[in-house]
Image: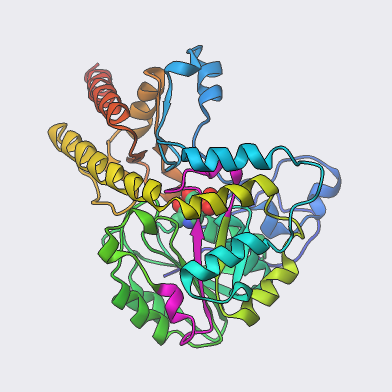
Amino acid sequence: MTDTSAPTSGEGPPRAESSAPSGGREAAKPRACGGPIHYAPEYVRAIAPYVGGKPIEEVARELDLDPSTIIKLASNENPRGASPKVQAAIAAAATELTRYPDGNGFALKTALAKRLRVQPEQIVLGNGSNDVLELVTQAFLRPGDHAVYSQYAFIVYPLATQARGAVGIEVSANDYGHDLDAMQHAITPQTRVVFVANPNNPTGTWLAGDVVERFVAAVPREVIVVLDEAYNEFLEPSQQSNATAWIERYPNLVVSHTFSKAHGLAALRVGYGVMDAAVADLMNRVRQPFNVNALAQAAALAALGDEQYVEDSRVMNRDGMRQVENGLRTLGLRFLPSRGNFVLFEARDANAVFQSLLRRGVIVRPVVNYNLPTWLRVTIGTPSENERFLAALGKALEDSASTRAH
Ligand SMILES: Cc1ncc(COP(=O)(O)O)c(C=O)c1O
């Protein structure tokens, strides 16, 4: 178990160099420039910025490639895009852009509440589920409080923890997945929040519902447990979680979901958390009044009604996963079996392989920031994207082998 927090030793001009790690990653060095930057909290200056998947346009610009020939398999998006019903809903909503959106998201919350058999007051909408994770830390973490999460867990947990000046307690993973027993033991009277990603990104590891519920039951009721289910829809239906039903028993449980992944709405930024109404009330107080825009609300509502599209996306992902796993096996590469829409594979000289894939117009995701420098993560694409990725990967591995030989 490691304390991965930034120092909370106050504000004022920085020391020459901060050695504060940020979520198990190398800390960002405060830039040497004068003025207000020096007076920002030290824990903020030490944050290593989030590194997202490279956008297609950026790769096209940097490598002088035609953007239409590039495929992006770097951010776990749905390769099918949004469903036609959702696109129609967005077009209809786009005719009214003058007014602020419904800050309480009445229609979307009502539909979600009906689907999940909870009350609308138990739902907090977010500008992506990332927003929900941030809202938890805003509402529940003070500087010096502890948040517990697993090694290799989604990187926003350490980032959001550090942004509050709280102390991140990173618990060693068990075979790349969450070690829930060790996480339970890491909870102390200072712990206010525990994060669990199921399935986890970037490892794709997953724990069965009964195992997770036993963990939630064992966490003291004054500690918030965030169960991040961003990839839940990619699980086999029999494995999909019913964690929202547990909230009655565990009022400290926050279950977060997103429309960015299986529903294909990553660009619009919309997600939600389900929790006890009193917890939701608190989180709504720290939320921006109009954090989910009108197009996102309309699109999410339509996406919720298009269950067939989500089911078809799940099946396509399952088949694509087999295709990519078989290809990785043929190339002799180690990978972690994944329950998400992505897979982590080991590529020894991962940076060279990443660069070589970029030159071939295939964007995957390095995971150096997770302390996994020899691994790369690839999102499952369409069958032809997967085929193109595997062919490019074969060539990239040949490139890196011949570079090593010289
Ligand atoms: C585990 C996990 N949780 C949450 C998110 C946040 O997604 P969004 O903010 O798009 O809902 C992601 C995105 O990659 C993720 O992998």
In this view, 259 is above or below 274:
above
Residue 250 in the magenta stretch? The answer is yes
The C terminus lies in quadrant:
top left
Decide whether residue 267 is among the magenta residues: yes
Numbered-mark total: 0
Residue 50 or residue 404, whichever sits in front: 50
Q: Nearer the viewer, residue 31 or 395?
A: 395
Relative to residue 185, is residue 137 depicted above or below? Answer: above
x and y percentages locating residue 128 in the rendered image: 58, 53
Residue 169 shows up from this direction: no
In this rendering, position of residue 302 left or right of residue 196: right
> Which corner quadrant holds the N terminus?
bottom left
Q: Quadrant of residue 74?
A: top left
Residue drawn at x 27%, y 36% as measured from the top left: 348
- Displayed quadrant of residue 153: bottom left
Q: Nearer the viewer, residue 129 or 173?
A: 129
Residue 295 locus on image (x, y percent): 65, 45
Residue drawn at x 71%, y 41% as measured from the top left: 31
Does 262 sit left or right of 105 as displayed? Answer: left
From what the image shows, is residue 286 above or below residue 20?
below
Report x, y in % for residue 282: 69, 76
Q: Which quadrant of the view contains residue 5? A: bottom right
* Residue 380 seen in the current view: yes
The boundaries of the magenta stretch are 243-270
Look at 65% across and 40% down and name the residue there.
92
Residue 103 percent coordinates (x, y): 74, 60
* Left or right for 377, reference 38: left
What is the basis of the colouring in this image?
A: rainbow
Q: Residue at x 18, y 33 (%)?
A: 327
Residue occupying the far right of the picture: 35
Residue placed most toward the observer, 52 or 76: 76
